[in-house]
Image (cartoon, grey):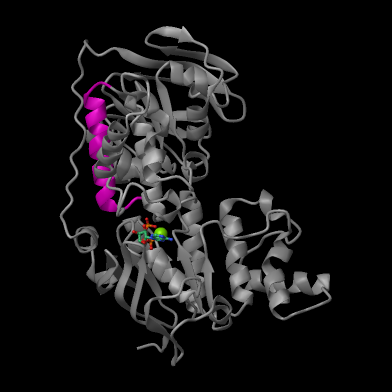
Amino acid sequence: MEEILVEVKNISKNYAGVKALDKVDMVIRKGEVRCLVGENGSGKSTLIKVIAGVENPDEGEIIIRGIPHKHIRAIEAIREGIQVIYQDLSLFPNLTVAENISLNYMVEKDRKIINWNEVKNIAQNALREIGEEIDLTDTVGNLSMAKRQTVAICRALIQDARLIIMDEPTTALTRDDVDHLFSVIKKLKSKGISILFVTHKLSEIFQISDVVTILRDGKKVGDYKTEDLDNEKLTLLMTGKKIEYINYVYEESIKYKTLLRVENLTRKGHFKNITLDLKEGEILGITGLVGSGRTELALSIFGLNPADSGKIYVNEKLVNIKSPKDAKSLGISYLPEDRLTQGLFLSQSIENNITVTVLNKVLNKFFLIDKAKKKDMSQFWIKNVDIKTPSMELLARNLSGGNQQKVVLAKWLATDPKIFILDGPTIGIDVASKSNIYKIIKKLASEGMGIIIISDEIPEVLRNCNRIIVMRNGRIIKKIDKVNQITEDELLNIVIGKEFEGVSL
Ligand SMILES: Nc1ncnc2c1ncn2[C@@H]1O[C@H](COP(=O)(O)OP(=O)(O)OP(=O)(O)O)[C@@H](O)[C@H]1O
Ligand SMILES: [Mg+2]
């Protein structure tokens, strides 16, 4: 058994009305990769904040290298080698790679005079330590997400990190970037550094972790060796229930009208000659690597970045969509990929956030807002997308990350569009809530809505769509009309460009 680095003992933390953590114990050993998992709102981020000294627990203690702390301050946690890489990475976008890696260290060492050669040397050594190459003079704002993450990891390293904690680091990463991050994590592990990692993607848990700690409703369910778990066991332990997926069945009928038709749509540098259509009741999946042009295509259909050439027909009529306002008036809605920055009023209640786009539906006969109707609508969506909250009056900022995502999703679903484009509908959402969201999407489609799901999660498109389009480098490279004739592996190979020979579609 490796030595214990950090021990969390009997930690509880309450927020008004919510027991975010309830007597949680956890042991982190030297050089292990531990995944911390559980449903949205189960207490993962809160536990991380307690370990990092950002939140004080109501009871319990944290023992670091044998020394117990009732309340650890953030600066003490850093001195003990505990480094948290938050999702926003907390980098300075206007500064160079070298500055971002080295400045915290310089400040910590109380250097009054900064020697730029030293700044560069320190940064170079950190990069070398994990075998990475990034131009030290590049401005961080110009780097890809993956490289920014490497910078954040290097910054942690030079502050003598013993434990690096990452709270959902892969949500904004492409598939290649995730593989790259995992190879960096393996290098850190081989140097004896411990990693605590949060993710909702089950495949990542199996790919990267040695051990898994599961939380449910603020309580610890248990610690498990990853090798003793599989998808089904893990899901059962996290949610307490068995989750079944039913594929979407779409019975073609001449009765169904074509809602959307896109012909030879081109936006230079982004996508070229895209032709597709969407009928009433269909769920069309668009997959491909991030950067394949999928999101750009959706933005063009929604009028945010209009195309250079090509035609769009809505209800068989040629339309000219120049702005989201045009798109909305034609019955098109778009759930953006990056919705937390675009879609949520943090200082407003959950209720106000859900109903803001549909206030016209909750008016009484005097055209005033009917408070009871507004509450009913909000309650309906809280239940349907599974928002975990003690009350609809709670401010959005006090929800867990995944529950914030669900509020934005509910807000758009409530608008009841004719054509709904969902970009990454379940980013950051736990397995159980995902399955509920899929049920809602299928129900809406079966009632006649036309839905497009853009996603890089292969099982997501396979289980929920009746047709799939694969994009690469701005072009459609494959159209799959019969979803039940292709397996997950085959689809993945098409997406990443390693098609199986002999597969006919
Ligand atoms: N400042 C706060 N005020 C009130 N409640 C809060 C606050 N911060 C967190 N909570 C509540 O504590 C619970 C645990 O939240 P936490 O963010 O730890 O969940 P999580 O496991 O990280 O979920 P997710 O997977 O959605 O990120 C949630 O019910 C959340 O609403
Ligand atoms: Mg969280």
Magenta highlight range: 425-448
> Is residue 241 located in the magenta-colored stretch of the structure?
no
* Horizontal and vertical percent position of residue 214: 29, 68
* Horizontal and vertical percent position of residue 42: 31, 62
In the image, what residue occupies the spot 21% across and 64% down?
237
Asked if 291 appears above or below 112 in the picture, the reply is above
- Tell me the quadrant of ligand 2: bottom left
Question: As drawn, is 223 to the left or to the right of 367?
Answer: left
* Residue 485 visible in the displayed image: no
In this rendered view, identify the residue nearer to me: 99 or 56. Answer: 56
Residue lying furthest front: 366
* Horizontal and vertical percent position of residue 100: 69, 64
* Residue 269 visible in the displayed image: yes
In this rendered view, identify the residue nearer to me: 249 or 502. Answer: 249
* Horizontal and vertical percent position of residue 261: 40, 15
In the image, what residue occupies the spot 31% across and 38% down?
378
